[in-house]
Amino acid sequence: MRIMPASKSLQQLQAIKPRRWIRKHPLLAVSLVSMSMVLFSWFAFFIWFEWGDGQQQLLPPFLRSNFNPKTGQRQAPLHFPNQESFERAMAQGLEKLDLPSVAERAARQILPAVVHLRLEYSKEEKGKPTSDRPEQRGSGSGVVIKEDGTILTNFHVVASAAQAKLMISFADGSESEGLVIQVMPEKDLAIVRPRKIPDDIQAATIAGSGDLKPGDQVVAVGFPFGIGPSVSAGVVSGLDREFRSPDGSRSLRGLIQFDAAANPGSSGGPLVNQRGEVVGIVTAILNPEKSRTFIGIGFATTMESAGSAMGLPRF
């Protein structure tokens, strides 16, 4: 019988003991291994953060100090001796960025809620003489103000809807017949409800005009001459203005005056601020020559006036 050396037997016994312990306590063994890995990871992270490049890598790129890959040395952080040099450096940096314009951001917010309204007349109605306000027999604009499809527009856009079919075109290209459910002629406002709405309909965000000041940028969106949706940008020219139509049929007060281009067909469309929030409804343009084209003076009914007239929430 061959006898194993004592030294070799001792080595085997030493190797067998941990194996037996692992088989006897598998969960404890896994826990110890996991804790060891976590502690090692934290230790490595601590070294990387304190003495490595961790602090810089965790900062946003524009806050990281310059690093020279050739020398491996880090340059001193930027220092501006005064406010003027800081503003100049910021301006130079912004010039290199391709930032969207105020008008583009505002238009992107409001466009899904803008609709085209048009009146479709029967053959008999088409043969009748038209009024001296062609938009009553043509088209206009509107804006969705509630997720149930409720649309706010001008009264004069839908005033002839009793003699025609009112059709609504949504931003996704779908169409629906519409019903005029409420009018406020003295405010030149009307509420329209479509018979069916798109599944992904988007309502506009409404805001008051209390924060508006002359010179603030605004955007008008609508369907001038049926073309659109068209976006035009301008500024608030004045507040609390009064408008009287040349024929004396309309007299409106408390209006926003703006210089963003508006033409026949723009009526009923939204006037929005820089954040894309609706602050007014485009309702009239002023042109002493009666050419019905824009000369730089447009008027919009404030959303406060629209809210009080149509039962909308106060701002």
Image (tube, rainbow, N blue to C red):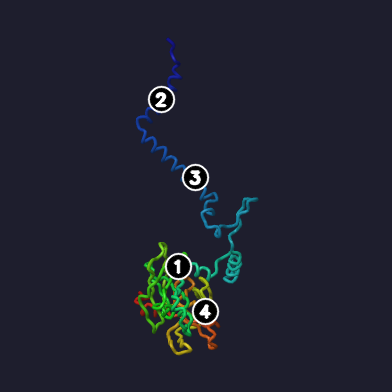
Provide the secondary structure element on which disc 1 rests.
loop
Q: Earlier in the sequence, mark 2 or mark 1?
A: 2
Q: Earlier in the sequence, mark 2 or mark 3?
A: 2
Q: Earlier in the sequence, mark 4 or mark 2?
A: 2
Relative to the observer, which residue lies in front, 304 or 155?
155
Q: CA distance from mark 2 to mark 1?
A: 78 Å
Q: Earlier in the sequence, mark 4 or mark 3?
A: 3
Is the residue under label 3 in contact with that under label 2 (CB below 8 Å)?
no
Q: Which residue is mark 3?
A: 44
Q: Which residue is mark 2?
A: 16
Q: Earlier in the sequence, mark 1 or mark 3?
A: 3
Q: Position of residue 246 (x, y in %)?
A: 48, 89
Q: Nearer the viewer, mark 4 or mark 3?
A: 4
Q: Is residue 58 above or below residue 31?
A: below
Image position of 81 (left or right of 280)? right
Q: Earlier in the sequence, mark 1 or mark 4?
A: 1
Q: Is residue 219 visible?
A: no
Q: Nearer the viewer, mark 4 or mark 2?
A: 4
Q: Position of residue 18 (x, y in %)?
A: 40, 29
Q: CA distance from mark 4 to mark 2?
A: 93 Å
Relative to the observer, which residue lies in front, 277 or 248?
248
Provide the secondary structure element on which disc 3 rests.
helix
Q: Position of residue 277 (x, y in %)?
A: 45, 72
The local crowd at label 1, few if under 14, some if 14 to 19, many if 20 or more residues have their Cα within 10 Å, is: many
Residue type of the residue flagged with mark 1? Phe
Q: Is residue 48 above or below residue 100?
A: above
Quadrant holding the N terminus: top left
Q: Which residue is mark 1?
A: 170
Residue type of the residue flagged with mark 2? Ile
Q: Which mark is residue 263?
A: 4
Q: CA distance from mark 1 to mark 3?
A: 58 Å
Q: Nearer the viewer, mark 2 or mark 1?
A: 1
